[in-house]
Image (cartoon, coloured by chain):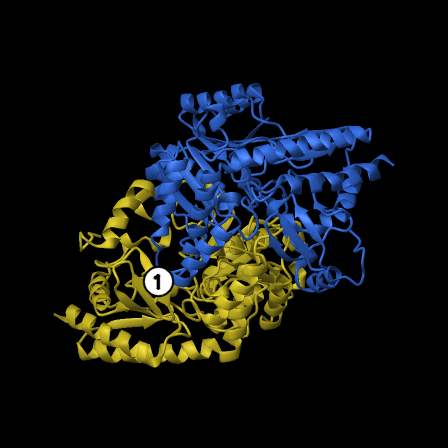
Chain colours: A blue, B yellow
Amino acid sequence: MPDTNLNSADTALRARARRVIPGGQWGHLDASRLPDGYPQYFASAEGCHLVDVDGRRFVDLMCSWGPIVLGHRHPLVEEAAAAQARLGDCMNGPAPVLVELAELMVDLIPHADWCIFGKNGTDATTACVTIARAATGRRKVLVARGAYHGAVPWCSPSVAGVTAEDRAHLLLFDYNDIESLQAAVEQAGPDLAAIIVSAYRHDMGQKQVLPTAAFAQRVRALCDETHAALILDDVRAGFRLHLGGSWEPLGVRPDMAAWSKAIANGHPLSAVTGTDRFREAATQVFTTGSFWCGSVPMAAAVATLTELRRIDGPARMHALGERLRAGLTARAAHHGLAIDQSGPVQMPTMLFENDPEWKKGFAFCAEALRHGAYLHPKHNMFLSCAHTEADIDAVLHAADAGFRHVAR
Amino acid sequence: MPDTNLNSADTALRARARRVIPGGQWGHLDASRLPDGYPQYFASAEGCHLVDVDGRRFVDLMCSWGPIVLGHRHPLVEEAAAAQARLGDCMNGPAPVLVELAELMVDLIPHADWCIFGKNGTDATTACVTIARAATGRRKVLVARGAYHGAVPWCSPSVAGVTAEDRAHLLLFDYNDIESLQAAVEQAGPDLAAIIVSAYRHDMGQKQVLPTAAFAQRVRALCDETHAALILDDVRAGFRLHLGGSWEPLGVRPDMAAWSKAIANGHPLSAVTGTDRFREAATQVFTTGSFWCGSVPMAAAVATLTELRRIDGPARMHALGERLRAGLTARAAHHGLAIDQSGPVQMPTMLFENDPEWKKGFAFCAEALRHGAYLHPKHNMFLSCAHTEADIDAVLHAADAGFRHVAR
């Protein structure tokens, strides 16, 4: 992306960064992949608002790509974190809050008999797969084609530096396609350790697809028949759709689940939950990290999950999401534009029809940004409990400008 | 370990934890592997002191197994972290402090032309290996037998859930053994992507071994000859031995290095540094995580590294380490006990001679703990800049009680 204002603070920081950071920025927060005018650097955030380093203020519809579920710098979360920080964070063992948090997770999540914690979503998905292999003594893992389960060689969307052996025991199926799933199960034969599935199909740049009940039930039945582990990757959707796990409304419970993002409202934490059948294997697999017993993120997680339960966060985000979806539908129609909205409303995805290279999406988002809404043209977005109806209306006002721009 | 006091707060927390956490505690901070009487849970920490949940206070010689390098809750670090937290932590992109920190790393570390950040040491070692493979188009990685480079299947000390393919392209050599190194290089042939080495041989339960200059130079020469990457795993030792990297005193610079633990005085952060030759590959490999642009740990890192440079932290810890080592030598001799102290003095390792099952070590540590010093019987320990000469003397006083106990 060309930097639009050569005198901006953002431009100056990008120039400095290019010297000392490969490509200027690594990973999913690289703003060079975003529409014209999007900032790379942020000065501050509060509630559902972001301020970039040039002082522009936006209603935030990415919520840091998921972690911010109660709003930036939520007082209850930050007070809990600060109170623990005044005692100690990273010590020679955990603080008592570890036990409190593990008990809360087991209480909230119906399938969970136990819980362990890490830092990254990838830590959690990798641990689930490793525990499944340890428990079953088998190797094959079924993964949906195109699904994102993390950023290390066994699952990275990039193949740079990846060897064939890193993925030797993965077998692919198509999300929601029972026939392809059964074919993959047959291919794995007696070596099937696990099926790992995302809460819904949230591949970037594509129409999002909710799991059918028949698909979810078939995944469960196949795991039961073969004694393989059903691993639910709830890293992205967890705690936004349902506090007990995203497949609870379908009545299908996993054997293990991976959690991260929203668990501590932006504090670095991830978790694996599992059933008693996998408890012993979870003790055999060595999962650890230097900061995995840090108690400040755990205190933040207790505060976050407690508040989400108290206010029924998923229901609140659902209502906001319905308002946003209906408003976008009406405004696009008003401008004679065909859009597609998919996925759960708490995690909105809006694509233009006949826009294979997302050119309309980019133009729309760039214009909406100029009118104060930080949207994404390709990736699912995220609502938080800090958004108000007025904030959604402000987004719709900005979106209206975006649609007008695209319609011209 | 039997819980020694059935009425203690620690015992009660352990009982609760056993229900909801497999084995009661995962990973390296599992206190059941420690001598009798060691606490699992901590109430607070300050400077070089820890207080457990039963109110016992210890001089801390583990420093959270490395992260705490300036002392627990160091005011400069915590103020920098809190100031950033008042602005924002996990946002849709980094705060300007990312650029400041990357510039500081490149300034401090002679080989570093660039820097990227993660959360775990394992994130950093895995990224180094993946970048080396992407840059060279080769697969084989040489690893020292018994070395610890992280806790995922390619490098975990446990083989539970690990497949043969996870380690298909690893070749082993013996640390400091040039002949075995050359044999492994020959075995890899034209497929050699990297040699990964720890700052020194710090395998648990064994005499620690510093690298010889000849070995380090040979690693460098072999990488130069074969165009493979020399990866220095400085996760554990980094910023304690030398702020520019642990092999600087040997005059040997790596192509990439992995950093974590002490980088932000306990805040969750890791880093990869590298030379320009690997910059392009670092842009191709997709390394990311939900919290990797969190700016609070970056602000903590800037404060930590700036303070370590200002006070010459490694020199201070070296002086403290010399005092501890001399004192332990004298007191063990006084009690007629043969001990072995090895590794860098900033990261003390003390083993008893003829103690293959560490029984003397366990008895020694349990007694020293009762006298107020938190030591480790098998693993290297860690000093911090918060320790004073008086704290070291307090440790020596406790150690004297431990030696007396073992001598009886």
Q: Residue at x 57, y 33 (%)?
A: A318
- The residue shown at (32%, 38%) is A280
Q: Residue furthest left?
A: B408
Q: Position of residue B208 (x, y in %)?
A: 37, 67
Q: Quadrant of residue B17?
A: top left
Direction from residue A121 to residue A145 in the image, left or right: right
Of all residues, the one furthest to the front in this rendering is: A390
Mark 1 Cα shell of 10 Å, populated few (<14), some (14-19), many (≥20) = many
Q: Is residue A285 visible?
A: no
Q: Is residue B32 visible?
A: yes
Residue B44 or residue A314, whichever sits in front: A314
For the residue pair B177 and B386, the one nearer the viewer reads as B386
Q: Amino acid at mark 1?
A: Ser
Which of A105/A285 is in front?
Answer: A105
State the residue in front, B215 or A175: A175
Please state if B350 lies on the left or on the right of B155 as rendered.
left
**Quarter in which the C terminus of chain A is drawn:** top right
Residue B326 in the image, given as x and y percentages of width and height: 30, 80
Please indicate whether residue B125 sits to the left or right of residue A225 in the image: right
Q: Is residue B219 above or below residue A325?
A: below
Mark 1 belongs to chain: B
Give SS at disc 1. strand
| Residue visible at 41% across and 23% down in the picture | A224
Picture quadrant where residue B327 is located: bottom left
Q: Residue furthest right?
A: A408
* Label 1 sits on residue: B44
The answer to whether A314 is drawn above or below residue B41 in the figure is above
